Image: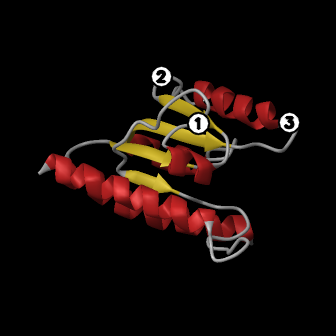
Amino acid sequence: MFTLNKKVVREKNLIVIKEFSNSNKSKLRYLGLPSDEMEDIICWKEYIKHISAVERGIKGQEHIRQHNIYLKSFNLGLNNIITLYRGDIDDILINGHDETQKLSYPYDLVNLDYTGGFIYKELGDSSKRIDSIKKLFNEFMRQQEFIK
C-alpha cells in the first residue's frame, strides 16, 4: 500500500511539474533524495535537465547505494546530468556542500522525501531538519533577489 500511495503522489506531482516546466518553457533543476531506485526521476525525467541527488547510504555500506544511483542513472541515460552528493541531506543543505563539492543552486524542483518523518526535535530546542529547510528557503529567496 505504501508503494501505491507514493506512486499516486508521484503522478500528482508530475501534473504540477509538467505545468511548471511548460509555463517556463524550460526543463527543471532537481535537488533531492531519489533513492537508488530513482522512481521519482524515472517518472519526471522528461522535465528534468539537471539532477543533484543526495544519498547517505546505510552506515558502513554507504558506497553501495551511492554506486547504485550512478548505475541507475547510467542505465536511464541520465549520467551526463547527475551530480551525486554523499552524506546527510540536512548537513549538506546547512553547509552548502558535501565533502567534495558545493551544491549547484538554483533548483526548481526539490524533493525531500525523508525517511522517518519530516520534523523532529533534537536535544534542547534545536532541530537540524528545520535549520536545513530554513537554509534551503533562504537560498531560494536569495536566488529570487538575484534574478530581479
* Residue where numbered disc 3 is placed: 61
The dot on residue 80 is: 2
Q: Residue furthest front?
A: 124
* Residue where numbered disc 1 is placed: 98
Tell me the distance, in whole angstroms, between the alpha carbons under discs 2 and 3.
25 Å
User: How many residues crowd around disc 3 within 10 Å: few (fewer than 14), some, or many (20 or more)?
Assistant: few
Q: Residue furthest left?
A: 148
Q: Is residue 144 left or right of residue 45?
A: left
**Number of the front mark, 2 or 3:** 3
Image quarter of residue 72: top right
Residue type pointed to by label 1: Asp
Q: Secondary structure at mark 1?
A: loop
Residue type pointed to by label 2: Asn
Q: Earlier in the sequence, mark 2 or mark 1?
A: 2
Q: Secondary structure at mark 3?
A: loop
Q: Earlier in the sequence, mark 2 or mark 3?
A: 3
User: How many residues crowd around disc 2 within 10 Å: few (fewer than 14), some, or many (20 or more)?
Assistant: few
- What colour scheme governs how the chains and residues are painted in the rendered image of this protein? secondary structure
Tell me the distance, in whole angstroms, between the alpha carbons under discs 2 and 1.
20 Å
Residue placed most toward the observer, 45 or 84: 84
Q: Tell me whether the residue at label 2 lies in contact with that at label 3, contact meaning CB atoms closer than 8 angstroms.
A: no
Image quadrant where one finds the N terminus: bottom right
Residue type pointed to by label 3: Gln
Q: Is residue 3 left or right of residue 79?
A: right
Image quarter of residue 16: bottom left
Q: Earlier in the sequence, mark 1 or mark 3?
A: 3
Q: Secondary structure at mark 2?
A: loop
Q: Tell me whether the residue at label 2 lies in contact with that at label 1, contact meaning CB atoms closer than 8 angstroms.
A: no
* Residue 90 x %, y %: 60, 54
Residue placed most toward the observer, 127 or 84: 127
